[in-house]
Amino acid sequence: RTRYWGIHPTKQQSQAAASVRKSKGLKTLAYRTLRALYRHGEPLLFVPDPQMLWRPLSLPALLAHVKKTRYDLIYSVSSPQTDHLIARDLHRITGLPWVADFRDWWTLSTTYHATTRMHLFVEREMEKSIISEADACVFTIPGHAAAIQEKFGMVPRIFDEITNGFDNEDFSQKEYQHDGTIKIDYLGSYYGKDYSAKGLLAILHELIPQLSEKVRVTFTGDLDNYNRELV
């Protein structure tokens, strides 16, 4: 047998506590429901990407800024692709020259997977509109412009391919001492099986036993779980 020697809550206190617990429970349920809707509904609702929510909010702020400051051109960089859509809106209103810089592929990427056929159609129309309306386009991947011409039957008015790299002059005066270790740095991201580190690792697996030096490989960038396990 047990006996409670504390102060017993009144009926009103018990009802108030139950009400608080019910309120917290409803808030938790609502929060979990919204999170689930966002997680599953994001690919359906946010086209081309979740940053589309910036678009209606950023344009008035940008227009107000353009009125105060004189600019020579608009320069947009993707991803996210919404950056180009905002720049296109600003270009249409202000008439300022516009350069669209594509740091990666869009719908032509091997890792791009459209949610539905309608999403694919809409995003490709967006991509074609940006390429056709921009005064110039910059691509970092060799062959990107040729792929666009082959797929869409169009080329930008002015375009150039400027790959990621470095200027030799920045390192010409530097001296390096070899410490007996071969250092390989990978700067970038690996994601999924379509764009994975499997090829690089397979080559290293065959090459390293033939070398007398130590080999150190550094990955700088995003690695998803699949590629982390490979590494």
Image: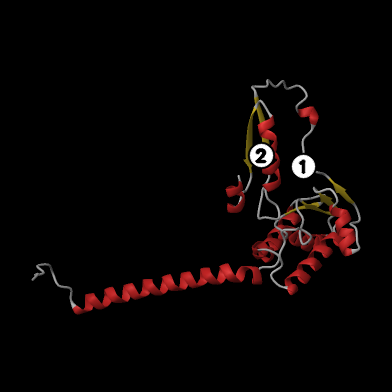
Q: Specify few, some or many for label 1: CA neighbours under 10 Å numbering under 14, 14-19, or 20 or more.
A: few
Q: Is residue 51 left or right of residue 148?
A: left
Badge 2 crowding class, 10 Å Cα cut-off, few under 14, some 14 to 19, many 20 or more, is few
Name the amino acid type tagged 2.
His
Residue at the image point whose x is 42% and y is 70% from the top:
28
How far apart are labels 1 and 2 at the CA level? 27 Å
Task: Identify which residue is drawn at 67% across, 33% down.
Answer: 208
Q: Is residue 186 visible?
A: yes
* Residue in front for this viewpoint, 226 or 87: 226
- Using the image as rendered, state which of residue 59 and residue 220 is in the foreground: 220
Compared with residue 197, is residue 56 higher up or lower down, i.e. above or below?
below
Q: Position of residue 216 (x, y in %)?
A: 62, 33
The image shows residue 27 at horizontal and vertical percentages of: 42, 72
Q: Quadrant of the C terminus?
A: top right
From the top left corner, tell me how far across and down residue 90 is, in percent: 77, 60
Q: Is residue 35 above or below residue 229?
A: below
- Residue that mark 2 sits on: 205
Q: Quadrant of residue 49?
A: bottom right
Residues at marks 1 and 2 touching, judged by CB atoms closer than 8 Å:
no
- Amino acid type assigned to the residue bearing label 1 in the image: Asn
Mark 1 or 2: in front is 2
Q: Which residue is mark 1?
A: 164
> How far across and down, in percent of the image, does residue 19 sit?
31, 76
Q: Residue at horizontal 74%, vertical 61%?
A: 86
**Could you tell whether 47 is left or right of 8 in the image?**
right
- Give the residue displayed 77% in from the left and 63% down from the top: 89
